[in-house]
C-alpha cells in the first residue's frame, strides 16, 4: 500500500509528466492479457496502479524513477499489455510506467535498427519495411505489443521458423537498461549478457531501447490448406519446415474445431479435417503447390501481401496467441496452454493426449526452429476450461506424455519459462539494479518475504 | 569419325552461323577443367571437335540441331567449360555447341529470374543484384561458368549453406529443353521432373533456359580466421553453420598447408594451424565476433563487399574448386577429391585418414546444408598426385573410413554423382530426346556398344 502523501508529492514534484489519473484508464493500464487464464483472473483482477505515467523520453523516465525511489513507490513497466502472465500487472499498486510514448526509431542501418522499447511492433515493422527489411520474429499481437515487451516478456512467433525465438544470439544485439536508484544508471549490454534481461517481465531494470538485426522483407502470400488427416497435415508441415528451397515466414496446424473460429476468413472445412496456415514468398508458390499435391492437401484460401495490406485482414492475426483470441471472441469458455512436443513423436503424443481428453483440448501446432536450427514443434492448444483443478490435471497429463508445458497460468517468473528458478545472473542483476525492490514487485518468488 | 563431306555440307548450308574454325580456338573449346584430374588428362587430351559453333539464339540452335541430325554429326554442348569431369569434351568429334552467346536475361520478377543457359553466372549475379537479389548458390568459378552449366554439370557452392545445392526443390523452378531430332521439339519442365536433366552433362537434351528462385542480396563481409587446432576450427564452423541468428553465405575450413596457396591475400598463419573462411552479413558482425572469441579463434583478415568490388579480389574465388585452383597456380602436383563426411564424426574420419596419408591429402571442408536442411560437411581435399593406382587407393581409403567419394576422376556419367547407374527417367529422356545418340556421345556407359 503506497501512501497518498507520497503519490501526491510525486505528482506535484513532476507536474510536467504525462500523468493518467482517470479511474477507467488506470484500470485498463493495470491489466494485460492475463485474462486468457481463468486461473490468473481471480488473483489479478483487483490489482490496480495508483497512478499511470507516460514518460515522453529518457530524461523524464530517469527523473520519475529517481523520485519514485526517493518516495519508495513501486513501479511496474508496461508496453502494449499483451503479455499472458500478468507481467505488467502492478501487484503492489504504485506507478505503472506506460512506455508507449518512448517509441523513437533511433537509427536504421544495413539490416540493423535501434529502437526505443515502447514502439509498437507493427509500427517498427512498417518503418523497416520502407527500407525493405522486416522483423526476424514477431508475435501475432504485433499491432498492440511493443518491441520492448516482446523482449522482456515474449518469445517469438511469426518469422521464428527462420530465425528462432527473439533470444536467438545475433537477433537482439544490444540493449540499454535503466536502473532503479536515486541516481539511475544506464547500462549498455551486448551479446549473450543481454539475455539476463530477456523474459524477466521488467523486474531487473527498465528496458530503454534495443538494437535488432532484421530480415530481408518479402511480400508474403498467405495460404490456408485443407488436409483430411492430421498425419497428412503434419507430414506436409514437417517437410515444409525443412524445405530449404521454399521461403516461408509462418507455418501452423489446427484441427477443424480450432480453425472453426477463424470466422472472418471466407473458407469452410469439413469437421474432422485439419487446417494448415502458411505465409510463403511469392517466388516459392510453385514448389509449395507441388508439395501440397504430394501430401494430398487442397488449397482453401489464399491472398497476396497486397490483399492483406488493403483489407487489413491477415493470417498473421490468426496464428500464435491470436488463434486463441479468435476462439475467445466466439466462446469465452476456452483458455490455452503453451506446449513443446518431442520433435520425433509429435503425432504419437497428440494421439495419446486425445485418447484421454477428447475435445477438451484442441490442436494448434506452430512449426519453428530454435536458435541452433533444431526444429521445434510448439503448440498453443485451446483448452475447454472447467476448473483450476482440471486445468492442472491437463497440464500434468501433458507432462506425463513428455509434452513440455511452459506454464502460462502463473505470474511468478520462476514458474514460467525459467523452469523453477532464476539464473544467478538474473538474481544478481535484480539486486544490483533494483536495490530497494521497487520494480514490478511480487513477481519473483525467491524474493518474497 | 565424322566425314569431312558432312562437316563441309553443314557449314555450307548454315553460313549465317557463328562458326569457329581456327585450330587454336577449337582446341580450347574442346576442353574443360578435366585437367584437375591427372587420370582424365591422358584419356581426354586428344579429343577434339571438328567444328565449334556459337548459336546466337534458339532459332539458330534449332536449325543447327536439325541439320546435324540430318548429317549424323555428334553434338556436344558447352558453357564456360569449368566442369571437372570432361562433361564438355567431344569424345567423338563433331560439333561443339558453345552456348555462351545464348545469354539473355528473359525476365526478372519478385525473386524469380528466367535466363538463357549460356549466361555467365557472374553476369547473372550482377544483373539480379541491381534489383537487390542474388543467386541462391553458385560455384567459385562463377566468372567463367554458365548458369546452364551449373545445372547440367554442377552441384552448388557459395550460398548452399542456406539453400542447399542447385537441385534443391524450389530453386530451379522450370527449364526448357531442346530435343535432338530432325524437327527439334522444345520441352518445358517444372518441379521435380526437371531434375531428370540435372547433372547429366547435357546428354539428354540441350538446356535452353532456366527459371531460378533468388535470394535477397546482402553486402557480404569476407573473413579469414585463425585457429590453433582443427577441433577449435571445426567447433566454430559447426556452431556457425547452425546459428540461425548469424547470416552467412559461405563457410569453409582449410589446414594451413592448403591455405598457404592463398598467396594473393595478405595474411600469414603459423604452420599447423587451421584457417576458416566465411562470408557473413554486415549486421551479423557482432555475434560472429562473439562466437569467434568463444571458440578461441582470431581474425586474420577481413574486407567488406565494397572492398571486394573495388579490388576484384574476393574469397569467393578461394573456396570450393578455387581452393584447388589457387594451389595449382603454385604447384602442379595436386589434384583433388570430392568427399562427403559423416556429419557426426567428421573429426574422427579426418584423424583416421591423416594417420594413414599424412600430408598426401590436405584438409578442405565446406559447410553447407542439403535441400532438407540437414547439415552436409563436404570436402575438396587437395591430393598430392603420384600415380593413378595411388589415387585409387586413396579414394578407396576414404570409402573404407565411411567418407563418401563423388568420383571426379571419370567422365562416365554413371560413375560420378549418380552412384553407379542412371535413373530410368534419365535413360528414358535420353532415348526420347536423342534417338540417334548424337548428343555428347560416349559419356553414358550403359549406352556404349
Image: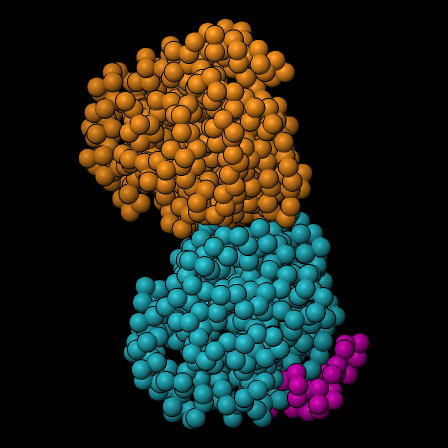
Chain colours: A orange, B cyan
Q: Is residue B129 positioned above or below B252 on the image?
A: above
> Which residue is pictured at 35% across the width and 36% down the height?
A427
Whether residue A178 sits left or right of residue A200 in the image: it is right
> Which residue is pictured at 69% across the width and 70% down the height?
B312
Query: Where residue B105 sits: x, y (%)?
Result: 70, 59
Q: Magenta span has B18?
A: yes
Q: Which quadrant of the figure contains the C terminus of chain B?
A: bottom left
> Which residue is pictured at 65% across the width and 61% down the height?
B305
Query: Where residue B434 sits: x, y (%)?
Result: 55, 73
Q: Nearer the viewer, residue A80 or B316?
A: A80
Task: Magenta stretch: give its range.
Answer: B1-30
Q: Nearer the viewer, residue A331 or B295?
A: B295
Counting labels gives 0
Whether residue B326 sits left or right of residue B306 in the image: it is left
Q: Magenta span has A62?
A: no
Q: Find residue A442 and report its image quarter.
A: top left
Q: Is residue B238 positioned above or below A299 on the image?
A: below
Query: Where residue B78 sits: x, y (%)?
Result: 62, 76
Q: Is residue A242 positioned above or below A274 on the image?
A: below
> Which residue is pictured at 44% across the width and 53% down the height?
B243
Q: Is residue B358 positioned above or below A218 on the image?
A: below
Q: Is residue A310 visible?
A: yes
Q: Is residue A230 visible?
A: no
- Toward the right, the furthest residue is B16
Q: Which quadrant of the figure contains the N terminus of chain B?
A: bottom right
Query: Where residue B334 sits: x, y (%)?
Result: 49, 86
Q: Find residue A83 and report its image quarter.
A: top left
Amino acid at each position: 500500500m503506497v501512501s497518498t502523501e507520497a503519490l501526491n508529492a510525486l505528482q506535484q514534484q513532476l507536474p510536467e509528466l504525462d500523468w493518467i489519473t482517470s479511474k477507467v484508464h488506470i484500470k485498463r493500464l493495470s491489466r494485460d492479457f492475463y485474462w486468457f487464464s481463468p486461473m490468473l483472473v481471480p488473483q489479478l483482477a483487483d490489482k490496480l496502479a495508483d497512478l499511470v505515467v507516460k514518460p515522453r523520453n529518457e530524461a523524464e523516465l530517469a527523473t520519475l524513477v529517481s523520485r519514485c525511489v526517493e518516495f519508495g513507490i513501486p513501479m511496474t513497466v508496461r508496453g502494449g499489455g499483451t503479455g499472458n502472465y500478468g507481467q505488467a500487472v502492478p501487484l503492489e499498486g504504485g506507478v505503472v510506467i506506460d512506455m508507449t510514448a518512448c517509441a523513437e526509431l533511433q537509427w536504421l542501418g544495413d539490416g540493423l535498427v535501434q529502437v526505443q522499447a515502447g514502439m509498437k511492433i507493427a509500427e517498427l515493422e512498417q518503418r523497416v519495411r520502407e527500407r525493405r527489411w522486416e522483423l526476424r520474429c514477431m508475435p501475432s499481437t504485433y499491432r498492440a505489443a511493443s518491441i520492448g515487451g516482446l523482449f522482456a516478456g515474449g518469445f517469438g512467433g511469426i518469422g521464428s521458423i527462420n530465425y528462432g525465438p527473439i533470444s536467438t544470439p545475433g537477433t537482439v544485439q544490444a540493449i540499454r537498461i535503466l536502473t532503479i536508484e536515486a541516481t539511475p544508471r544506464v547500462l549498455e549490454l551486448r551479446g549473450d549478457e543481454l539475455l539476463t534481461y530477456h523474459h524477466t517481465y521488467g523486474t531487473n531494470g527498465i528496458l530503454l531501447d534495443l538494437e535488432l538485426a532484421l530480415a530481408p522483407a518479402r511480400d508474403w502470400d498467405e495460404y490456408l490448406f485443407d488436409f483430411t488427416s492430421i498425419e497428412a497435415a503434419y507430414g506436409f508441415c514437417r517437410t515444409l519446415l525443412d524445405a530449404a528451397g521454399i521461403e516461408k515466414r509462418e507455418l501452423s496446424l489446427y484441427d477443424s474445431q480450432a480453425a472453426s473460429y477463424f470466422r472472418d476468413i471466407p473458407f469452410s472445412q469439413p469437421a474432422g479435417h485439419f487446417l494448415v496456415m502458411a505465409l510463403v514468398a511469392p517466388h516459392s508458390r510453385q514448389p509449395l503447390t507441388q508439395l501440397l499435391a504430394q501430401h494430398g492437401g487442397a488449397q482453401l484460401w489464399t491472398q497476396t501481401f497486397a490483399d492483406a495490406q488493403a483489407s487489413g485482414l491477415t493470417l498473421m492475426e490468426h496464428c500464435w496467441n491470436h488463434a486463441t483470441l479468435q476462439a475467445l471472441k466466439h466462446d469465452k469458455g476456452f483458455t490455452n496452454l503453451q506446449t513443446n512436443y518431442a520433435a520425433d513423436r509429435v503425432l504419437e503424443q497428440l494421439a495419446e493426449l486425445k485418447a484421454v481428453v477428447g475435445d477438451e483440448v484442441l490442436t494448434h501446432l506452430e512449426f519453428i526452429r530454435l536458435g541452433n536450427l533444431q526444429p521445434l514443434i510448439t503448440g498453443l492448444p485451446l483448452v475447454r476450461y472447467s476448473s483450476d483443478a482440471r486445468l492442472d490435471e491437463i497440464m500434468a497429463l501433458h507432462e506425463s506424455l513428455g509434452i513440455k508445458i511452459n506454464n502460462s497460468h502463473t505470474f511468478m517468473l520462476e514458474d514460467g519459462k525459467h523452469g523453477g528458478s532464476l539464473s544467478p545472473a538474473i538474481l544478481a542483476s535484480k539486486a544490483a539494479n533494483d536495490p530497494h525492490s521497487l520494480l514490478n514487485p511480487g513477481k519473483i518468488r525467491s524474493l518474497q518475504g
